[in-house]
Image: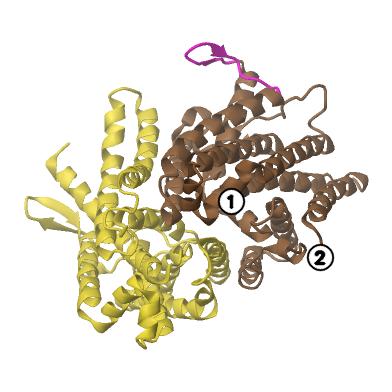
Chain colours: A brown, B yellow
Amino acid sequence: MLTEKKFNLIIVLGIFAFSLIGYVINEPYFITLATKIVILGIAGCALNLILGFGGMVSFGHAMFFGVGSYVAAISAFHSMNGETINLIFFDFNGSSQMLLNWFLAVIFSMFFALVVGSISIRTSGVYFIMITLAFAQMTYYFSVGWTKYGGEDGLSTYVRNDLFSINTMLPLNFFIICFACLCVVGFILNWVINSNFGNFLKGCKENEKKMISLGLNPYTLKLTAFVISGAITGLAGALYVDLNRFVSPTSLSWQTSGELIVLVILGGSARLFGPLLGATVFILLEQLLGEVTENWQFWLGVILVLIVLYFPKGVSGLFIKD
Amino acid sequence: MSLQLFIEQLLNGIQFGFMLFLMSAGLTLIFGVMGLINLAHGSFFMIGAFSASFVAGLTGNFFLAILASLIFPALIGIVVEFSIIRKLYERDHLDQVLATFALILIFSEATRYIFGAFPLFLDIPNILQGNILLPGEIVYSKYRLIIIIIGLFIALGLYFLINRTLLGIQIKAGQNDRQMIRVLGINISRLYTIVFAMGAALAGLAGALIGAIQSVEVGMGEPVLILAFVVIVIGGIGSIKGALIGALLIGVLDTMARLFLPIFFELIMETSQALSLGSSLASMSAYLLMALVLIFRPTGLFGKK
């Protein structure tokens, strides 16, 4: 059994080692898998801030992931075709700079999270699950109907964006960029969870009335957490666009929201990096089963059911002692 | 637009609404009585459609096929309830979401393995094909009218079951106080199994009835499932009456929005854009209604505080 700190270190280093091995034995596909794990891990950890620590089960996090994706993709798309976007105050030419596109993705998903959160947090329990789903479905159908940016067929961006003078098309370079984002996000989330704010948030999950009697406002606390979570999920979405050089309404669909929840519960929602382990297990299972059998989804389902029934603390519960 | 077209579309909306009701009735009972979020409910819709088209292919008899769409999903429902679902009642919603999400993968892949990846077809029997002339010179599809009538009967039947039978009283008691009915010596796990099987059968019936209009394929249940969730949240979880009213509201709203929004947008933009914008906004309308209802009534129209 490990302490949580050691567990975090091992999982992060493990993913890094996995991609290095891919580099050494010249299997770029390994590196791509590791990159995918890192990006979905970021989204999962962000969801876990509100789900595991705040007790808010969002079934609409695909919305923030997809909004981040679309914002980054649209910016990159315009920078390629040279067409300007007429914003009310100024013209925007699009950008192929990762940093700027990340920034835009984070700002937009924060805004969405603020609007959706301020309405959704009035409800709780299953109604919260459903209202977040409703908002995500609205953005999904909006993206399907938005033919300017591909509609149902999605939008291709062809090349990856630039970051300083790094060649981002090399898989290992792009992996390291994503990995650096993961580390930064990890530090931020760790800080948030262990701050006073984080303790109050956990308090809201346990007993909201007690928090009110302490003179705190649960609504503001929860909304702040929701916005932080949405912003980081948006960043993951922007990275995912650069990985695939493509975005489609699928990234806004309820299946994506469901998968993000699966990552969290699979890894264990009580831990900061539980979802990162969840992403690792999920993607590797998908991959390994896919090589063995055509009906891998069936066996993936069976394994997931067994994990829920017999390991209620998620996979990370096997390694970490309380 | 003629009045006839309007009424025809209104009937289509009602037909869609009753189909949603068949899905939502089980979902809302399962949630209300057992506290279970069952994402796999859409799989029973699919299983119903596949068993119907399989039996229809074997016997050529549509009515046997409909019977099969009730029986097979109920049997599979009982097996799943016994082996997996029953262990989830005491867990929190998250575990239920993960487990039933996994069940979707299992059911979809198993169906694909057994029946192949290509869609199947289920033919409407001859006597139900064609149109019927309704009062007011409205020409309407016989088959869709039958769906409306079946939906009405099921709604009445459920009302009778819940309010006039012992089982119904036990179900209502189960919604109010689970501990108490256990103390009163009612076999609660049998009650749970019955409710789950009943929900699965109704979903299966809906799948078979719709399978004859659309194609029968893997994954057909999930879009309906999500709309059924919208319905039960609008109606208030656990309430059959709420499910009925919510289903009809959503059915009519969705159909009407699909009819009117493209026409409306054609006034201000070109046709192809108007069509795609109109249909995507129409798809959003159900969710918009749900968000509005939840903002003003956070536990749905007929939900308990």
What's the distance in space between the residues labelled 1 and 2, CA to CA?
A: 25 Å
In this rendering, the answer to whether A161 lies above or below A136 is above
On the image, the x and y values in percent for residue A295 come to 64, 66
On the image, the x and y values in percent for residue A220 come to 49, 38
Which segment is the magenta one? A83-97
Judge whether residue A93 is colored magenta: yes
Asked if both marks, 1 and 2, belong to the same chain, the answer given is yes
In this rendering, the answer to whether A162 lies above or below A278 is above
On the image, the x and y values in percent for residue A34 come to 78, 47
Circle 2 residues within 10 Å: few <14, some 14–19, many ≥20? few
What residue lies at 64% left-to-right and 48% top-to-bottom? A44
Residue A9 tag number: none
Quadrant, the C terminus of chain A: bottom right
Please, which residue is most extreme toward the right here? A24
Q: Secondary structure at mark 2?
A: loop
Residue named by callout 1:
A202
Q: Secondary structure at mark 1?
A: helix
Classified by dominant secondary structure, the portion drawn in magenta counts as loop
The amino acid sitting under disc 2 is Met
Q: Taking B167 as reference, is B72 left or right? A: right
Label 2 chain ID: A
Q: Quadrant of residue B184?
A: bottom left
The amino acid sitting under disc 1 is Lys
Please, which residue is most extreme toward the top here? A90
First in residue order: circle 1 vs circle 2: 2
On the image, the x and y values in percent for residue B44 come to 43, 69
Q: Taking B138 as reference, is A204 left or right? A: right
Nearer the observer, B72 or B305: B305
In this rendering, the answer to whether B19 lies above or below B294 is below
Residue A23 visible in image:
yes
Residue A1 tag number: 2
Label 1 chain ID: A
